[in-house]
Amino acid sequence: MAKYDLVIRNGRVATAADTFDCDIGIRAERIVALGQQLEPGREEIDASGKLVLPGGIDAHCHLDQSTSDGSVMADDFESGTRSAACGGTTTVIPFAAQTKGQSLRDAVEDYHQRAQGKALIDYAFHLIITDPSESVLYQELPLLIKEGYTSFKIYMTYDDLKLNDRQILDVLAIARREGGMTMIHAENADCINWLTERLEAAGQTAPRFHAASHPALAEREATHRAVTLAELIDVPILIVHVSGAEAVEQIRWAQGRGLRIYAETCPQYLFLTADDLAAPGFEGAKCICSPPPRDANNQQAIWDALENGVFQVFSSDHAPFRFNDPQGKKLGGEQASFRYVPNGIPGLETRLPLLFSGGVNDGRIDVNRFVALTATNPAKMYGLYPRKGTIAIGSDADLVIWDPNQLQTIRNTQLHHNVDYTPYEGIEVRGWPVVTVSRGVIVQRAGELVAAAGRGQFLPCAIPDPARPKQHKP
């Protein structure tokens, strides 16, 4: 009988800290041996000439999430996790979103039902808090944190989602007391609404005007305010989907003062610009998301911040709406104002190849920084480390074999999501995930799925180290 269920041989292994030649022995879903000339496995993979990296963790994606405008997300937990696995991701953390008037507990149960029997890879949940009532704050949220829902997202914009400053302070105070990581969408809602009304009054309603309605200064102001509120409570926060230089400046300023301010960015701010929103006709709607992609100078500022450590996490913010669909991007019709176009773009499957090609192979970051941004840091920020996010004895055998030189032109016809477009159509990348292993099981090989939906497990999250409650001095 073979000592190992699976052995990966002859690969170049990279973690967030080290790069080394090593064979990997896997048994009972875990990594149990790292070394040379391991005994035979029941199954073996020859990774000669390849990199072996920890499976990616996409810590910001929306799957089968309810909306308030009648639009319908294209990806559920089956198609979304299928797409993620083919892109080298082995864990996703989507959202259990509370609607106003709903208990958090009911929201969590709802999203567990949506995921039941569908996920191909493992998943956890962030909470979205839209109605921080006393019962939510002082009864439900502390219990849910203890049960493994240790991160939650709050919004400073969108009328049906946003919290005011007092409500944000209340949530942050519970996060400090109980040990939760608060993610914040930082844009100034009143600035956006005021500008939108004036653009519409002037007849400026095409998709390209979405960018004008969400200016960088609205993100800058909200980022500064989020930092200030977090400093008042003395609690860590993570600013999500940072899009430009002005918000980066606020985050760098806060980090330089020793505040526990963490940040995330996404592929759309590295590979798209506002010019993509100005595509002919209604095509620009494909790239409507908030905050929007900005100009080339802001794009460079995001690359710089990714290189120099301002960002800890790189996520997709996958929010999938079909383009040619009255429940998708064409919800209001092609002549409707940009404000009625559902916000979001697909990106689960393309997140890692884009960053590997544009970051590692183009010399902006090394492979260890790539692993940190896409796997290790998300695991640490959201309470999954060291079970996930690294290659170590005892960790889950979530591994991806990369061909660092494989050339691939991104085509939507080759992707595995349920969306009828990709905003990255035609981009040529170098480096591609050729095998994905989830808890010791090969789930993707050469772009073909070789495992069934439903094998993914829910992951309760520990209190993240950066969010551990501070001991009060007597």
Image: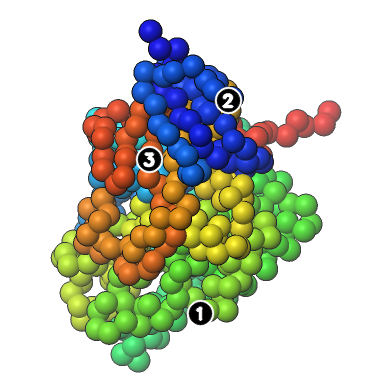
The kind of residue on which mark 2 rests is Gln
Picture disc at residue 435: 3
Which is closer to the viewer, label 2 or label 1? 2
Residue 322 against residue 200 in the figure, above or below:
above
Q: Residue at x 45, y 37 (%)?
A: 47
List x then y, in percent, for residue 136. 46, 37
| Foreground of the two, 441 or 11 | 11
Q: Residue at x 65, y 35 (%)?
A: 465
Callout 3: SS: strand
Which is closer to the viewer, label 3 or label 1? 3
The kind of residue on which mark 1 rests is Asp
The quadrant of the rendering that contains the C terminus is top right
Residue 258 against residue 342 in the figure, above or below:
above
List x then y, in percent, for residue 77. 28, 41
Q: Residues within 10 Å of mark 2 (few under 14, many from 20)?
A: few
Q: Is residue 229 left or right of residue 33?
A: right
CB atoms of marks 3 and 1 within 8 Å: no
Callout 1: SS: loop
Q: Which of disc 3 and disc 2 is earlier in sequence?
A: 2
Q: Residue at x 44, y 18 (%)?
A: 40
What's the distance in space between the residues labelled 2 and 3, CA to CA? 21 Å
What's the distance in space between the residues labelled 2 and 1, CA to CA? 49 Å
Residue 159 against residue 455 in the figure, above or below:
below
